[in-house]
Structures are given as structure tokens and as C-alpha cells.
Image: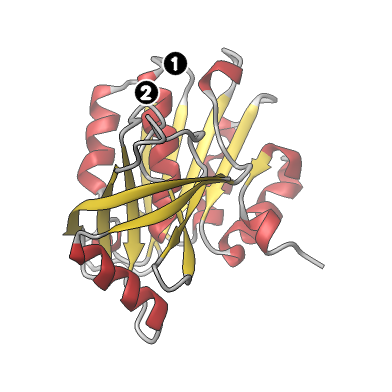
Amino acid sequence: MKIYTTRCTEFTRLNHDVFRARLRLEDAANSSFAFVAGQYLSLSLPDGRSAYFSIASAPEQTQELELHIRQMPGSDLNADILQYLHTGQTFSVGLAEGKACVQATQLSSSTHLVLVAASTGFAQIKSMVEHLLAANLPNPIHLYWAARQEEDIYMEDLCLRWARDYPQLEFIPVLSEPHAGWLGRRGLISEALVEDFPGWHTQQVQIYASGSPAMVYALVDALAPLGVAEERIHSDVFAYAPRP
């Protein structure tokens, strides 16, 4: 892991409980950030406490990092990080960790990509999508975002713009507790993938899932009877919350 000095240059609210932080490189010893799309970093406060966050920006943005931070009532560390980012003072980040990542140069032309996000797991998926689109790959991308209600899909406009501008990308939001007027998909994300399985499944499919352990393992269990081997499903959950 490499340590960089950074400063938060923009801190904005994306919805009722998610904030976006943009971090600028402030390190004379390093000319650019180095990571792979889908990896995460450690953010360290001056008192030594640290937390991990997925990188939401693509590696092509070498001078700036984007983080999506969810407000967590009852967590002193979370509150202190959010407050410190407001100060504009420098702090350290360590890059980069995580094996659930994507490199466009290593994908074959026949690979289908199924990207599944829940909550701020979208940060990891956003990095992947922006990297893949920057590489101008024609590979089909099926982007699922699971949430309780529509306001939890905090960058829905961006996803809709991707789907409009890039014909290879399909955006499928899935809500478990939608309001009465919701016209999109309803239910659990694992159920949605099973329903859509005939439309995206090939022997070259690669699935990336970013969310809670419960969501990821429900997805694994739902797809296993359909012949999707766990080796085709990639998630950091397998490293930090392995099954017994």
C-alpha cells in the first residue's frame, strides 16, 4: 500500500444520508494516484484512526479521488471523518487494496459484465463503469442497483445518462420497498438476476457485486442452481466476510 497526502476540495450531499467527497493530491513526492478500478483505500485521521472506502472515481482521473460516504448514526468515527473533511486540512490515504477489480485490457471481447450495487456499494461499481467506458469497450454491461426506495439511488441521473449515451450499457434499478408510483423493478436483487438470467448469461459472464455480505451471498446462492460458478462472481465480501 502506498501512502498519499490529500485534501478534500469538495464535500456535497447526494441524498438524505450519502455525501460525496473529492480528494485532491497534495503530495510533492507522488505525481498521481495509482489504483485499479474497483479497489478501495484507507483514510486516516491525524489521531491514527482509519476507515476503508471504495474509490468511486476511475483510475484515469490521476489527480483526484472521489468517495461516497454514508452517514452512520451512532458511529463516532464516521461522524469525525465527515466533520474533518469539512475542515480542508490535509490527511493521509493508503492506496490501494481489493481484488474485486476490473482492468479493461484484460477483458476478452466476448466477456459480458454484470455489475451489481447496493447502497454506497455503487461507489465501487461507478469506478468500474467509468473505466470501462473510457476504454471504449463494446462489451455488454448490465448495471443493477438495489435499494429500498428511489431516493436511495443517489446517482440515478448519472446511470440513466450512461444508458442513454452508451448502447452497450443497460441500467436496471431494483427497489425492495418502492413508493406506490414506482414503475420499475420491484423485489430483491437476487430475484431480479434470476429472472433476467437468460438475457445476460454466457459462458464468459463475469459478475461483480458490491454491497452487504447478506446481499452478495444471497446472489451467489440464487445463481448457483442456474450453473453460475462462484468463480465468476467477484466481491470484496469474500475476503472480509468469508463463509465458515
- The amino acid sitting under disc 1 is Leu
Q: Residue at the location (72% across, 43% down)?
A: 226
Q: Which residue does the numbered mark 1 point to in the structure image? A: 137
Residue situated in front as seen by the camera: 75 or 137: 75
Mark 1 → mark 2, Cα distance in angstroms: 6 Å
Residue situated in front as seen by the camera: 78 or 208: 78
Q: Position of residue 61 (x, y in %)?
A: 33, 30
Q: Residue at the location (32% across, 77% down)?
A: 79
Residue 162 placement, left or right of 188: left
Q: Residue at the location (32% across, 46% down)?
A: 66
For the C terminus, which image quadrant?
bottom right
Residue 54 placement, left or right of 221: left
Q: Which residue does the numbered mark 2 point to in the structure image? A: 133
Residue 188 placement, left or right of 17: right
Q: Position of residue 149 (x, y in %)?
A: 30, 65
Callout 1 touching callout 2 (CB < 8 Å): yes
Check disc 1 and report its element: helix, strand or loop: loop
Q: Position of residue 162 (x, y in %)?
A: 28, 31
Q: Residue at the location (33% across, 20% down)?
A: 167
Residue 115's tag is none
Q: Position of residue 222 (x, y in %)?
A: 66, 54
